[in-house]
Amino acid sequence: MSRRSIPLVMLATLTVLTVVALVVSLSQSASHQNPFGAPLYGFGGYRIHQPTTEIGAQWRVPAIDPSSPPRSAASTWIAVANSQRQFIQVGTLEITYGAIAEYAVFWSDVKVGFHPQFIGIAHSGNLIKFKMVQTSRGWRLDFNNVTIHAYPRTIVVPYGQGSTFDSAQWIQEDPTVGNVSDHVPYPTMVAPTFRHVTLNGATPRLREKDGLVLATANGVILVPTSVHHGQFTLTGATGPARQYLTDFFAYDVALYPFQLDTFHSRSPSKAVLRRIRTTLSTIGTELRTQTWPATEMSAVKGDERYVSDYQKLFAHYSVAPAPLNAAELTALRSDNRRDKRYVIRIRHALGLPPA
């Protein structure tokens, strides 16, 4: 198999998914507003909710280290979405089969099932500019490999014609393969720096509340830096922030099947509930026994109450094939509203965005 054919094989199997289409986490208001997404923990970067007709950014394609896990992959992209479940993106894929690394430019949308559509070869270190502009014909996708002095390339995707898009996203992703929760290993590499970030032809004001943390099954946890002069990167979490994110990663993974069940109006299985209860019990123990900075102990105690509330909620939750219990859903929404403040407080104390 040639080196050039490898990206096409991986592109046929990887699924790159939207961040706005996520089933709502328990730290947010539970509702049926998200249709097809992957777990929130698989995305890092920024998203902002406002009407969007143009989005742009540029970055250097990150080099994958040969020590990366085999068949690992990452994806770097910009995208727009809306509450009507529409979504379109353009960016780069970073893929490795161990010693062999490949890089490609792609686009994707809902109509192609989020499967990347290959539109160009790239190389590590290439500086590539991307822009998406809404037109009467759909979305115009522009990319320009500045490093190799290539001519700018433009394609028009007849998607979302006449629709209003109200979410703009600049994301580093741990893609999935097969099932939407089956993330491939994340490669060893320096995260890209997003530069010259634009929204509707201007530099957007992206704040901490707009940030997303990328957490992966193989232990890579990346936190977006603050945005200065239209630029940000993602850096590895350290100290108490990493400890907290590591503690809750197993819970996020266990919770996702429940979120999907709730979205599809069905009760969870015994196995799903058992895993949720087990991870909550573990987190409760970790919060009580781990060493935390004295300045953050009050926030940690709040998170212990958060965990305790959900332990009570899930202790006797309805199990499939029984239908969803309206009283339980009401209790879930009540707990979400009450306990959201605990999550926001501790994450802010640790220098983390609320999601």
Image (cartoon, grey):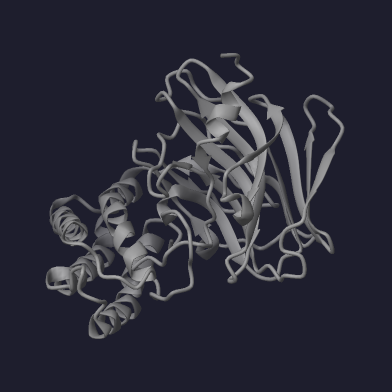
| x and y, in percent, of residue 128 in the image | 73, 36
| Quarter of the rendering occupied by the C terminus | bottom left
Is residue 189 rendered to the left or right of residue 310?
right
**Between 343 and 24, the one nearer to me in the picture:** 24
Q: Which of 332 and 304 is in front in this view?
A: 332
- Using the rendered view, name the quadrant where residue 158 is placed: bottom right
Is residue 282 visible from the viewing direction of this image?
A: yes
In the picture, measured across the screen, residue 114 lies left or right of residue 166, that is left
**Residue 48 at x, y = what percent?**
60, 64
Left/right placement of residue 191 relative to residue 57 reads left
- Residue at 59% across, 41% down: 76
Quarter of the picture holding the N terminus:
top right
How many badges with numbers are in the image? 0
x, y percent for residue 161:
76, 65
Does residue 295 show up? no
Q: Position of residue 222 (x, y in %)?
A: 45, 44
Give the image quarter of residue 47.
bottom right
User: Camera-side residue: 277 or 48?
Assistant: 277
Q: Which residue is drawn at 65% across and 50% down?
A: 89
> Residue at image x 41%, y 62%?
348
Q: Which residue appears farthest toward the right when viewing the image?
A: 151
Relative vertical location of residue 185 with respect to residue 246 in this rendering, above or below:
above
Where residue 317 sits, quadrant-wise, is bottom left
